[in-house]
Image (spheres, rainbow, N blue to C red):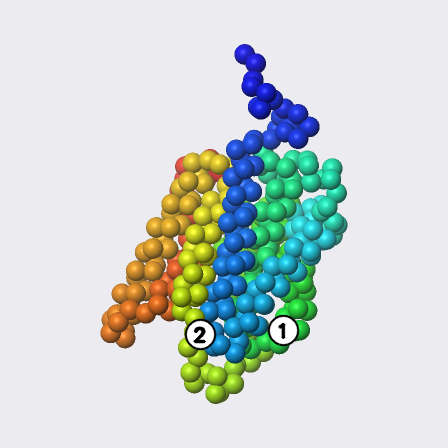
Amino acid sequence: MELPPNLKADEASPEWMNKGDNAWQLTAATLVGLQCVPGLVILYGGMVKKKWAINSAFMALYAFAAVLICWVGWGYRMSFGEKLVGFLGRPAVAVDENFLLGQPFLGYFPTATMVLFQFVFAAITPVLIGGALLGRMNFVAWMMFVPLWHTFSYTVGAFSIWCPDGWLAKLGVIDFAGGFVIHLSSGVAGFTAAHWVGPRLDKDRERCPPNNILMMLAGAGMVWMGWSGFNGGAPYAASSIASLAVLNTHVCTATSLLTWIILDFFAYGKPSVLGAVQGIITGLVCITPGAVYSKMALQLHY
């Protein structure tokens, strides 16, 4: 039985490529990208005082663009390329056509798709760090911090845990979609950076209401919906594991939001929008490292 013309292998669709997986992976990458731009851009711009709004939003936008250049310039190969040492790959560009059109270390889609998908993960990490520095850090200092942290911190974690040659991966460390590589690393980096930069001015700490609650909610909503690509793309296939990961993600997030609202009610006598947003972010972060860790899912995924 002969395949229809649109399913036959050709130069643009080699035999090893699964068009459905490739389409889903590109969609998942776009969803994660939308978490940053415009999701976290408008979340950060809306949640801070009016005088910090533009600077805070610009920090997120800049980090997204800066990481992309670092990623294709040297970051991807340092994270997933040829082993240099046990925790880092050899720096090299990821823009060669032959390299990008080949099959990656995992999945049935072009390396170009893997580079894009892993880029949005790399990009959101310093943007999350920026949340700890809103109203604290000079923008020029942030411009220098982002590429340096990406090069000397993010790539080490990604290679060690996610690359098959990484020393932690060989020890059996599992991180489904970024609990260690993204959330733990950005949390520790944000806490440390906030300590070294120091507290905000006393007059700014006395009262710090969000300047636009509707924009803050819109940004948080985009982050929540974009997480379908975050966890749903981690299996690297349009599979039942992806479906389970997406469903678990939304159930956990909704539970966290409602729990935070109830706690606000008991603690302060009424629910709050800020509490709801905190509940959303907490639920999303908590579910990420283990979105599908049942015995069956582990067997199917690994």
Q: Would residue 222 be seen by someone viewing this image from the given angle?
A: yes
> Mark 2 = which residue?
211
Closer to us: 137 or 31: 31
Label 1 element class:
helix
Closer to us: 64 or 102: 64
Q: Are marks 2 and 1 in contact (CB under 8 Å)?
A: no
Q: Would residue 168 be seen by someone viewing this image from the given angle?
A: no
- Along the polypeptide, which appears first: circle 2 or circle 1? 1
253 with respect to 58 (left or right):
left
Single out the residue that lies furthest toward the top. Answer: 1
Residue at the spot x=73%, y=40% of the render? 97
The image shows residue 156 at horizontal and vertical percentages of: 64, 56
The image shows residue 296 at horizontal and vertical percentages of: 41, 37
Identify which amino acid the numbered label 1 is placed on: Phe
Foreground mark, 2 or 1, reads 2
The image shows residue 62 at horizontal and vertical percentages of: 62, 64
Label 2 element class:
loop
Closer to us: 59 or 126: 59
Identify which amino acid the numbered label 2 is placed on: Asn
Closer to us: 47 or 155: 47
Q: Badge 2, how many Cα within 10 Å: few under 14, some, many 20+?
A: some
Residue at the spot x=58%, y=52% of the render? 120
48 with respect to 275 (left or right):
right
Residue at the spot x=45%, y=48% of the render? 228
Residue at the spot x=51%, y=45% of the render? 28
- Mark 2 → mark 1, Cα distance in angstroms: 20 Å
Label annotation for residue 139: 1
Q: Badge 1, how many Cα within 10 Å: few under 14, some, many 20+?
A: some
The image shows residue 110 at horizontal and vertical percentages of: 63, 37
